[in-house]
């Protein structure tokens, strides 16, 4: 009879393997590549229904953006009077865990500075390891159809085969312009995501929802960076009253000096099956299924820019979601070690706290409500 | 922290509720009805991907069978020289648990008698509570395309919108002719099932795969009825060497004298959420999703016949299947009470035994390999 810690550990780890064996593939960590966009039926049957990612080549070659955005001339002109949201951080890591002066980890959001697009683009170009900040033009509030409306005609308003398959239009379309210093920490979204790269490359690490215990999701206190133009310095301030955000604890690329410590804190991640690795190049679209954990880094084009646009479609909250919640409610015996080791950590297990916050309030989109 | 019996019980029962709340509906035990066949995309998106049943009206009105089978004239003539497999049991309950003289329960399969179709039909008509046997013309080995090939043109060879959605043709098409005495015990199939009624009515009880613990699946020794024309009596013989078949222990319609005992043996079934109830009438098709548990009874038409045809399509063994296997590997604390009470039972828990038998060997189709 199962239920004892040892058996539960075995069953959860068997699930990681089985999800891979059944449809994802065990021999490679690459996702399936399609040479051209699928039909709506094929997309729905083979990927959405199966909750399986795919990378689609030659997906956006017909977009005017493919040529219009190859230099900045058109973008600067079309967006000359547009005000956009520029995210500023000291390191390029926003919506990520950061050490707080209280000596514990917190969930840190960027300083958001509204500014004219041409100045925002200049700030991105000037972002480097020696600069005072790293700038990332992004706002996950449907920004492509609001702040960037003037260039809306350069890309398709929706991905036709995906809209037909999913039976709806995108709930949000977001634009991302940054450079190699910006990265996005592991998280999941409650959306079906079509992620198109227009310039440069995006490098994804992907884990299926069945691997939830390997992410060590814990509640972290929300904090915000505040940047002072006068001093050129950032302050990181906790929200008051305190608000907890459930977030993945794993940094898959720890610094050399932290590597050993991180690997011993998160053995389920570092010792388990390798994540799927996908590089999305200009002209390609990644289908990133709902509830998959993803970590994103990027490489710029020859001009120093990575530009991407993503389409969020409503997901179906069906039996797969019910199964996921059930799985998440179960403790993996070794996923609690972290708290034992980590006396200085403010993080609390969401399993211990009993409830995942309402997805529409705190965990919506990137898991953070104040970004909308 | 979960993992203790009490918490696991709570989490499993929350899963039963959540699967219903998310997409199946909690206010009624009826499945969604569509007034006419869905488009392939709608069928795939709203039902197959979500693993959700639906009942489709006006689905087979264009079939020649609708009129040709309304009397027996055409059937007797077209099948005058066809040999079909007639299943004989003492009670109408084949592929069901039955008490064995050893005083324990076994999994009893029918006596299968090949005979000319007109005689088989006569035997079905003569099946009643006073007759020596109950006859059911059925063979789940693609019989409609083999034994009944002569009337193949009376129905569609496949359900067009389903084949397009699922991307394949049916793996098997089966015909079922019986009367009100034949019933099918709770089980699940590893197929997407399109179930069309041509004459009479079929009454289904349905439970989603998330309710697996409520079925008390246990291993029972396989046995077969043997009917002797000479004595007019059945013998029930265990297979030798013994072979175990995992089967649902719950009879949802216990006799009055057994009711209290059955309800106390299977509280997770009798005290939990009510099963979905669907009556499928002539001209309608039930989409019975893969892995759903179903129990079937039937009512005859005015001539005394229930005729149905079902199309089995290959299911996708994807993340839903991995989640199901994980769920099934976990013990529900109270689902083991049965074995404690039931000292005379040969059944063993498939959780205790560790492994579900290979689906391609023992549990294929109706969970029984020797029927193919």
Image (tube, coloured by chain):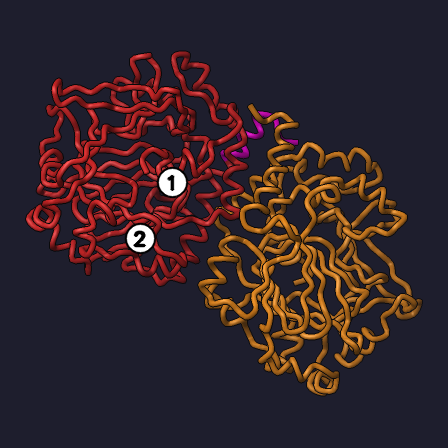
Chain colours: A red, B orange
What residue is shown at x 17% (from left), y 32% (from top)?
A: A135
The C terminus of chain A, quarter of image: top left
- B43 sits to left or right of B200: left
User: Could you classify mark 1 by the number of other residues whose Cα lies within 10 Å: few (under 14), some (14-19), or many (20 or more)?
Assistant: many
Q: Could you tell me which secondary element the residue under label 2 belongs to?
A: strand
Residue B23 picture location, percent across and down: 54, 50
- A164 sits to left or right of B46: left
Instruction: Look at the image and say whether residue A344 sits in the magenta stretch.
Output: no
Q: Magenta residues, as a range?
A: A1-13
Residue B244 picture location, percent across and down: 72, 47
Q: Looking at the picture, tell me which residue is in the foreground, B44 or B117.
A: B44
The N terminus of chain A, quarter of image: top right
Overall secondary structure of the magenta section: helix
What residue is shown at x 63% (from left), y 32% (from top)?
A: B10
The residue most toward the left is: A73
Can residue B362 be seen here? The reply is no
Query: Where residue A154 is drawn, which disc sits there?
Result: none
Instruction: State the separation of the CA atoms marked 2 and 1.
Output: 22 Å
**Location of residue B123 (image quadrant):** bottom right
- Residue named by callout 2: A33
Can residue B210 be seen here? The reply is yes
User: Could you classify mark 2 by the number of other residues whose Cα lies within 10 Å: few (under 14), some (14-19), or many (20 or more)?
Assistant: few
- A45 sits to left or right of B286: left
Q: Is residue A205 above or below residue A194?
A: above
Q: Could you tell me which secondary element the residue under label 1 belongs to?
A: loop
Q: Looking at the picture, tell me which residue is in the foreground, B38 or B226.
A: B38
Q: Nearer the viewer, mark 2 or mark 1?
A: 1
**Location of residue B41 (image quadrant):** bottom left
- Residue named by callout 1: A189
**Location of residue A203 (image quadrant):** top left
């Amino acid at each position: 009879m199962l239920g004892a810690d040892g058996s539960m550990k075995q069953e959860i780890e068997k699930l990681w393997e089985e999800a891979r064996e059944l449809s994802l593939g065990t021999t490679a960590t690459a996702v399936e590549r399609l040479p051209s966009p699928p039909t709506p039926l094929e997309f729905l049957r083979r990927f959405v229904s199966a909750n399986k990612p795919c990378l689609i080549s030659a997906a956006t070659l017909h977009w005017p953006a493919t040529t219009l955005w190859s230099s900045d001339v058109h973008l600067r002109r079309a967006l000359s009077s547009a005000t956009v949201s520029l995210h500023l951080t000291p390191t390029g890591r926003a919506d990520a865990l950061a050490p707080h002066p209280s000596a514990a980890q917190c969930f840190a959001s960027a300083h958001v500075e509204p500014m004219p697009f041409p100045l925002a683009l200049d700030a991105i170009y000037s972002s480097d390891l020696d600069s005072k900040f790293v700038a990332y033009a992004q706002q996950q509030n449907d920004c492509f159809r609001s702040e960037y409306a003037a260039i809306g005609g350069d890309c398709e308003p929706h991905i036709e085969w995906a809209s037909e398959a999913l039976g709806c239009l995108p709930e949000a379309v977001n634009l991302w312009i940054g450079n190699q210093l910006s990265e996005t920490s592991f998280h999941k979204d409650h959306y079906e995501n079509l992620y198109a790269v227009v310039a440069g490359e995006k490098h994804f690490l992907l884990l299926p929802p069945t691997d939830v215990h390997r992410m060590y999701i814990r509640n972290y206190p929300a904090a915000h960076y505040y940047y002072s133009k006068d001093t050129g310095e950032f302050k990181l301030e906790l929200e008051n009253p305190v608000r907890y955000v459930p977030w993945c604890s794993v940094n898959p690329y720890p610094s050399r000096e932290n590597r050993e410590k991180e690997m011993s804190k998160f053995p389920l991640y570092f010792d388990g099956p390798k994540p799927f690795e996908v590089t999305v190049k200009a002209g390609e679209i990644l289908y990133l299924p709902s509830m998959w954990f993803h970590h994103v880094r990027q490489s710029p084009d020859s001009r120093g820019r990575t530009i991407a646009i993503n389409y969020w479609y409503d997901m179906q909250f069906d039996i797969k979601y019910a199964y996921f919640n059930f799985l998440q409610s179960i403790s993996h015996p070794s996923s609690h070690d972290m708290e034992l080791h980590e006396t200085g950590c403010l993080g609390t297990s969401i399993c211990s706290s009993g409830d995942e916050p309402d997805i529409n309030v705190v965990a919506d989109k990137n898991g953070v409500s104040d970004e909308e």
